[in-house]
Amino acid sequence: MKIPVLIVGAGPVGMTLASELDRYGIPVRIVDKAPHRTDKSKAMVLWSRTLELLDRGVGGAAPFVDAGFKLEGVTFIANDRVVGRVAMDSIPSLHNYALALPQSETERLLEERLVKQGVRVERDVEATMIAPDDSGADTVLVHGDGRKETVRADWMIGCDGAHSTVRHAMSVPFAGETLLSDWFLADVHMSGYPRPDTDASIHWHKDGVLLIFPIQPGRYRIIGDLPATEGAIPPTPTLDQVQDLVDQRGPAGTRLSGAIWLSGFRINGRKVASYRESHTFLAGDAAHIHSPAGGQGMNTGMQDAMNLGWKLALVIKGDADESLLDSYSPERSSVGDTVLKAAERLTAVATIRNPVAQQLRNLAAHFALRLTHFSSGVAETMSEVDIHWTESGASRGAGSRWLGVTASVCSVWNGKQSGRKSREHISWPARCQYQSAAARRYDLARAPGWLSGVFVSGHWRDCGLSSSNRRIISNARFVGIQSIDRSGWTKNSFDQLGDSEPRLNSNSCGERCV
């Protein structure tokens, strides 16, 4: 059987990609060798950028927000004294918070979205004997009842985790290292937490670090480091052992009960050099794994899927040259490098053992976190809203983030705006999305230097623009665009839209770079 797209792995990354491709009208099959979705909490947070991107899909981000718990800040503590706090309300996003949501719930909601789209996740189906080539990939799908199915996919995407079968078939090295320490994870009920449940806390202790992350009122995830053991797998802690570590490193007077999940693990920092080999791609943990510091692993993977989805849709429909896909690996690999290095730095800072270095760390953090610019920058980095593509060949000139642009819709014909408030021709310098008051997403995508495709109301339309030749634009629609030139937004653009100052209200929209 020949199919257009086969996604291997139906975790958050694979299901996000399947949803995006279907949204663009691309037939897709998605398989997973596990018979059921995960019932573990695993990745625990959805960040602002991910929520903004989820807003584009069926039902938007509202089901996720409704099921989760909003966190407003992270407090840093050393020697029982508050060093500083990072507030999430400074994040320039309609979702200016961290959303605590167990991965099991994220997967449930993504699969429910797929069901509404008419896409079925094929579980208990393992992709074996994967053979990628220059025009696709062959594989044998082994079903749970033993039935075997030979499939030829024009495009294959490996979203199958750290032990990716697709990555092994591509013979791509997974370079990196494993930290020489053990870590524990505990999802528990706890009483006596001395801070608001809307704040996570990071405790720097002379013997190690302790992270307390509220999942919902009364329920928390606790993570900490331990001395290394010799076993291949770190031992699973008991609830009493976790209580002892909280008593030693964390807030006094807390009492743990009702353990939901206890686990031991080691931190791996690994990444592939390239996310693409011809018609085969990697996304999520199949391409990069790193420290849980910052909670960005699942989010980065879901954003991999969003980035690849619209590009692959354009290429499959013939609305863009296959060279557009060349931008996927450099763009997402750059993000992967940044997240990996940031997680390594956060882990290294948190686990300093030298007493003098600990004191210097505490003093530096106390000073830096009092600076609004610094603490806001930390929040933007954690939430991943600071990601941009200024260096990408597919987005020369992109990267600015604006909030508060009042939405208006203009149609474009023959390079001229003919809709409301029509002005001059469009020569769009960025790849962005805009969100109107009705929370509809309009994805603007372009080839180097110029707009190349616009997604409107479920359909991609070829705009046929290149840096050397602008051709007719048929029935394209834009949000919040008035006077644009190669240098980007002009001041006149904002004045014409009647909202020259950034603000957030029901009439505002925000730029996002995919």
Image (spheres, rainbow, N blue to C red):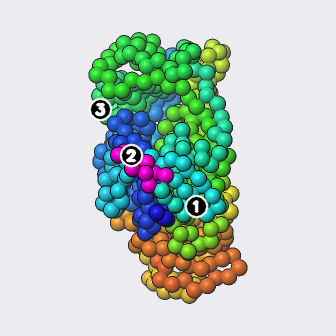
Per the rendering, the mark at residue 146 is 2
The disc labelled 2 sits on which kind of residue? Gly
Image position, residue 222 (x, y; %): 42, 25
Label 1 with label 3: CB-CB less than 8 Å? no
Quick check: is 357 in the magenta stretch?
no
- Label 3 sits on a secondary structure element that is loop
Main SS, magenta residues: strand
Give me the C-alpha separation between circle 2 and circle 3.
45 Å
Quick check: is 148 in the magenta stretch?
yes
Foreground mark, 2 or 3, reads 2
Image position, residue 320 (x, y; %): 59, 72
The disc labelled 3 sits on which kind of residue? Pro
Per the rendering, the mark at residue 457 is none
**Residue position for label 1:** 136
Above or below, 441 relative to 114 = below
Looking at the image, residue 330 sits to the left or right of residue 47; the answer is right
In this picture, which residue range is highlighted in magenta? 140-149
- Label 2 sits on a secondary structure element that is loop
**Residue position for label 3:** 217
Give me the C-alpha separation between circle 1 and circle 3.
48 Å
Above or below, 355 relative to 258 = above
Residue at 64 percent of width and 61 percent of height: 134
Q: Which badge, 1 or 3, comes first in the chain's sequence? A: 1
The residue nearer to you, when weighing 27 against 359, is: 27
